[in-house]
Image: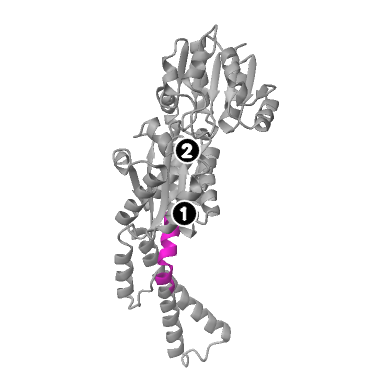
Amino acid sequence: MAILALGVSHRRAAVDLLERLAFTDDDYAKAYRRAAEDPTLHEAVILSTCNRVEIYANVAAYHAGFQAMKRLLGESRGVAVDLLAEPLYSHYEEEAARHLFDVAAGLDSMVLGEPQILAQVREAHRRAEAEGATGHTLTALFHAAARAGRRVRSETPLGSAPDAFVEAGVALADGWIGGLEGSTAVIVGAGQMSALAVKHLRDRGVGTLRVLNRSLERARALAARADAEHGDLDQLTRSLAQADLVVSATGAAGLVIHADTLRSTARERRLFVLDLAVPRDVEPSAADLPGVRLVDLEGLREALTAHADGAAAHIAEARTILAAELHRFTLRRRSERLAPLIHALRDRGDAVVAAELERFRSDLGALTPDEREAVAALARGIVAKLLHDPIVRLKELSVPGTEDAHARLLAALFDLDLPES
């Protein structure tokens, strides 16, 4: 069995494809049922964020697993698999683990060091676990990735990276409006990204801040933390007419702010609209309205690339940490797969020691019990040292595709029956 990762990300796909592929809360159960019904996929975890949609699976073979996962992604999201051919990527075994470690550390995000992704990786595994879709292999992988991500955040400056999605967008708004101090801002949504927007806008001295959400209680809770006004989405049109800046970051499956809604609002000033949602909250044609500037994740690429360039000096430090964690995970995984053979090898060594001590029992009869035990310990130590290097080399050399060859060679050299793994 092997780990295979398959997905589409911001690196090779446009936002409109990412939003078509994005999973909402109601989509996961059906997708995991599909995965459970496919005999090719023995475990599966779906990771869907604003930057990527990826599936991680435990498969018996690469090609069959790849085809099954591509069907799962396309059919679950109603997207023709032909549309996935160009942006689709895959990673196998150690490279799959390396990729997930990069993702958890925020090195594969549109925003280098993105703070939300580590929690999203953990949540993806928890969801799969709740659906009964994951097992020992992917659980070990996601726990190791979470550990690697935590280390990067705690041990490098990337861990203190600003909330760059929101910060970059708010900076653009500040420049376009001519200063946010004393302005009126509307936050649509009450999740984590909205909370970050509230924080950044307060830091920039926004005058009136209003939080709108489908759930009035959640809007009230977020507004209370920031001394802001709150309301439900029924107040959206009136609030848009009074706003200088709108930040929308809901988890809605469809559009929340339509171009016609913005067109109908009587505004005396320009409006900056920042759409941080995937799928998008704001109808793209709103960008054509006079006096409106719309920026979504696609539009933030240039600003976020500049942020990444500024943090490039810290990437090497993060890479060192990730390499160490990947080595640790890889050796543990190889040890588990090779455990039956290693146990058999050690048992053979113990048997040889026992047989030789029995053969020379009469010669050792004159020794005291302590002396006989010292001789036995010496023999066991010599055998253990002789076996140590072959075992270590077996783990190091057993890269994907060579495990059976090295295991069979070692079994043949020591005349062992190769246990089934």
The residue stretch that appears in magenta: 328-343
Q: Is residue 185 above or below residue 320?
A: above
> What x and y, as percent, mark residue 214?
61, 31
Crowd around label 2: few <14 · some 14–19 · many ≥20 (10 Å): many
Q: For mark 1, what is the residue? A: 33
Does the CB distance between marks 1 and 2 fall below 8 Å?
no
> What x and y, as percent, mark residue 269?
53, 7
Q: Residue furthest bottom?
A: 362
Q: From the viewer's perspective, is the residue at label 1 or at label 2 nearer?
A: 1
Query: What residue do we see at 41% from left, 20% from top?
Result: 285
Q: For mark 2, what is the residue? A: 49
Secondary structure of the residue carrying tag 2 is loop
Answer whether residue 342 is magenta in the image. Answer: yes
Q: CA distance from mark 1 to mark 2?
A: 21 Å
Horizontal arrangement in the rendering, residue 288 relative to residue 115 (left or right): left
Horizontal arrangement in the rendering, residue 348 relative to residue 135 (left or right): left
Choose top left, top right, bottom left or bottom right for residue 312. top left
Q: Which mark is residue 136?
A: none
Q: Is residue 199 above or below residue 12?
A: above
Answer whether residue 399 is magenta in the image. Answer: no
Choose top left, top right, bottom left or bottom right for residue 108. top left
Report the predominant secondary structure element of the magenta stretch: helix
Horizontal arrangement in the rendering, residue 119 relative to residue 35 (left or right): right
> What x and y, as percent, mark residue 376?
49, 80
Q: Is residue 286 above or below residue 290?
A: below
Query: What residue do we see at 54% from left, 9% from top?
Result: 267
> What x and y, as percent, mark residue 201?
59, 20
The amino acid beneath tag 1 is Arg
Q: Is residue 404 above or below residue 134?
A: below
